[in-house]
Image (tube, rainbow, N blue to C red):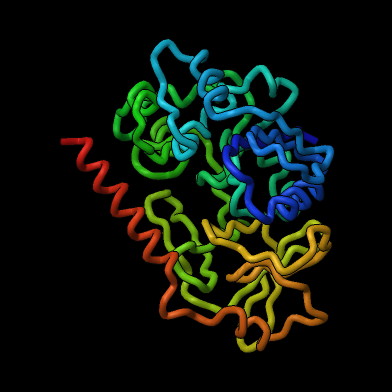
Amino acid sequence: MKKIVFLCPYFGTLPPHTQLWLNSCKMNPSVTWYLFTDDKRKFDYPENVQVFYTTLEETKALYQKKFDFEISLEGAYKLGDYKPLFGYLYEEMIQEFDAWGHIDVYDEIYGDIRAFVTDELLEKYDKLMIFGHMGIYKNSPEVNRRFELSSDLNRTYQEIFSSSQFYNFEEYVAGSITRIYQKNGFPIGKLDEVIADLSGTSYHFRRGYISDDFETFTYLPYEPMIFSWEEGKTYCYSVKNHQVQKDEFMYVHFKRRKMIQDIPDDASTYLIVPSGFALMPEEITVDLIRKYSQKKLFYPVYFEEKWKGFKRLWNKIWRSE
């Protein structure tokens, strides 16, 4: 089996549900995580999660050694732009691995990753998935330096990494690493049909997906749904034709939600609902799913995210003038 490592710089206090995240890593024993953090609190780290205590400043100094121009990494927000470079930035640490990836620590729980990321897919595609919350790349010197190629905007990597501006380079937007792959015809497998990528601007869960040309991101129409973590697997329970439908997913990405944990750290099964993590009932019914899937007319996070988006747009316009 091909070996995968996820490279995870995270600075500041790790989220309250970190142990649940670690437990979901543990149930993927054939996958390795390297966590780079300055949070030295004690957690029950599984064998496949290796912790490297460091700071943002030390990480910037490490990255700087790879470039002959002055880079910008003044805040953790900028780390997203560096995600597609991790194979190059940490190349000495990952030589034993066939593939490397980046993830979000804050807002995801994993199911059975290797049930979906097979050796056949790792062989066929140079890059799997096109989002910042998870991407996997072949580990080769050539693939690891593709960030140096021009994208659809012909923006140089020197411009991106010398600027304090956040460019969403790890995503699918114009000027991103995905556009570099598209422009050069490099093979990408998007896998969004097995990813529970949930809206962060509506209280109820809505799954998102990307079009085949990577141009349009859309959320599916509303339907009652909740998720579960069951001994290493993640499932969606939805209501279809007044019946409960159960589907397995690779992982759940509950985008920027402040999740309340109403379960013990060592829970082997639990629900993932819009408000947080809840005890697993004896039976999941249509009424239970509908109860957790009620819409909220006022959801403060919606306005927070819209305000953040406006500020990002304003800063982009201001810097371009």
Which residue is at the front of the view, 304 or 142? 304
- The answer to whether residue 269 is visible is yes
Q: Is residue 93 above or below residue 240?
A: above
- In percent of width and height, residue 291 lies at 61, 84
- In percent of width and height, residue 289 lies at 64, 81
Residue at 41% x, 32% y: name it.
180
- In percent of width and height, residue 14 lies at 63, 46
Question: Where is residue 169, by image quadrant?
Answer: top left
168 sits to left or right of 252: left
Residue at 57% x, 37% y: name it.
11
251 sits to left or right of 216: right
Question: Where is residue 310, by image quadrant?
Answer: bottom left
Q: Is residue 306 above or below residue 312?
A: below
Which residue is at the front of the view, 111 or 309? 309
* Image quadrant occupied by the N terminus: top right
Outermost residue on the top side: it is: 68
Residue at 51% x, 46% y: name it.
131
Question: Where is residue 103, by image quadrant?
Answer: top right
Residue at 49% x, 59% y: name it.
209
Outermost residue on the front side: it is: 41
- The answer to whether residue 122 is visible is no
* Image quadrant occupied by the C terminus: top left
- In percent of width and height, residue 130 lies at 51, 44
- Count the marks: how many? 0
Q: Is residue 206 above or below residue 318?
A: below
128 sits to left or right of 162: right
